[in-house]
Image (tube, rainbow, N blue to C red):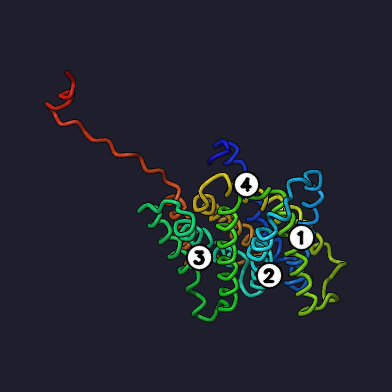
Amino acid sequence: MAGLSRTKSAWMIAALVLIWGLSWPIYKVALMDTPPVLFAGMRCFLGGIFMLMLALPRWHALRWRQCWRVYVISGVFNAVLFFALQTIGLQYLPSGLFSVIVYLQPVLVGLLAWMWLGEPMTVLKLIGLVLGFLGVACISAESLSGHLSVAGILFALGSAISWALGAVYVKKVGDRVDGLWLVAVQFTWGGLATTLYGLLTERWSDIQFAHGQYWFGLAYGALLGVSAAWLLYFRLVQAGDASKVASFTFLVPLLSVVTGTLALHEPITVNLLVGIVLIVASIYLVNRRTRPKHRTPVAGLEGSSKV
């Protein structure tokens, strides 16, 4: 990736996948002790405040007059919509399955980056994106049987769409803003807006402050799930093709399914397994490098141009 060595990119991707993969079952447990929107808003807001403290020594890089629109638009997609929709939706579906649907996002990013950013759309990448769609369709098929929630799937899809729009937007305008300030500002105001909405629609008294699993989920979300992970993600997106970076996040559902199964005893269905296989295949195809074709010299003509 441009601006990052292969080794550094690999470590950043591994850290991102680990943080986000573990977040789904952790949030699922924390949601037993808190209303969803308030939980989403609080972890975003606290994560933003933490990043603000880190960014303050670089006050000159804020450039508020020139960049405030970027902070607002990015915050709407990456903070308000993404976190609120995913947190509400986690109440309706197992964490592993919900995360797989949300990770339709790389497929959407591939299409948006092609149409909006002019990133190349090769045949292999197109096939990979189609496989991604088929994988999501496969794991969503069981909702028709009544075992899964249609509302949960819709929340997950809405979360994927908002995340995809936010990622491509950041890639398009990323050279205008400082990455640290982008994470800090968008999640501070986005988290505050989400928390205020939660106070209007939910009850603060429903939060079980005495339970350690709530505080663990909140701290994990603020410090790692928001601050560290999104800073890594935006840095990777700004340094490389948005579609290729996004495709690596397909690995997150794999880790989420494993942790959700082991920790929460959630079932692994045949449709889920098939969907994961298709998603893994799509990652490979989207990121596979095509080698330039070399013309095989025709016998008797090789070197005929030499004098």
**Residue at horizontal 76%, vertical 57%?**
48
Residue 114 in sight from this viewpoint: yes
- Is 291 left, or right, of 160 in this rendering? left
What residue does disc 3 label?
Answer: 272
Classify 10 Å Cα crowding around label 2: few (below 14), some (14-19), many (20 and above): many
* 14 shown above or below 267: above
Q: Position of residue 103 (x, y in %)?
A: 55, 61
**Secondary structure found at label 2:** helix
Q: Earlier in the sequence, mark 3 or mark 1?
A: 1
**CB atoms at circles 2 and 4 under 8 Å apart?**
no
Q: SS at mark 4?
A: helix
Which residue position is annotated with label 4? 235
Disc 2 target residue: 84
Above-or-below relation of 144 to 179: below
Real-space Cα distance between discs 2 and 3? 25 Å
CA gap between label 4 and label 3 equals: 31 Å
1 or 2: tag closer to the N-terminus: 2
Q: Which amino acid type is shown beneath numbered disc 2? A: Ala
> What residue did someone put label 1 on?
188
Mark 1–mark 2 Cα distance, whole angstroms, equals 14 Å
Task: Look at the numbered discs 3 and 1 and tell me whether their residues touch, using CB distance below 8 Å.
Answer: no
Tell me if 296 is positioned left or right of 122 in this view.
left
In the structure shown, which secondary structural element does the residue marked by tag 3 occupy? Answer: helix
Q: Quadrant of residue 267?
A: bottom right
From the image, state whether disc 4 or disc 3 is nearer to you.
4
- Give the residue drawn at x 17%, y 26%: 302
Q: Amino acid at mark 1?
A: Thr
Within 10 Å of disc 4 (Cα), the crowding (few <14, some 14-19, many 20+) is many
- Please say if 279 is above or below 34: above
Task: Quote the CA–CA distance across marks 3 and 1.
Answer: 36 Å
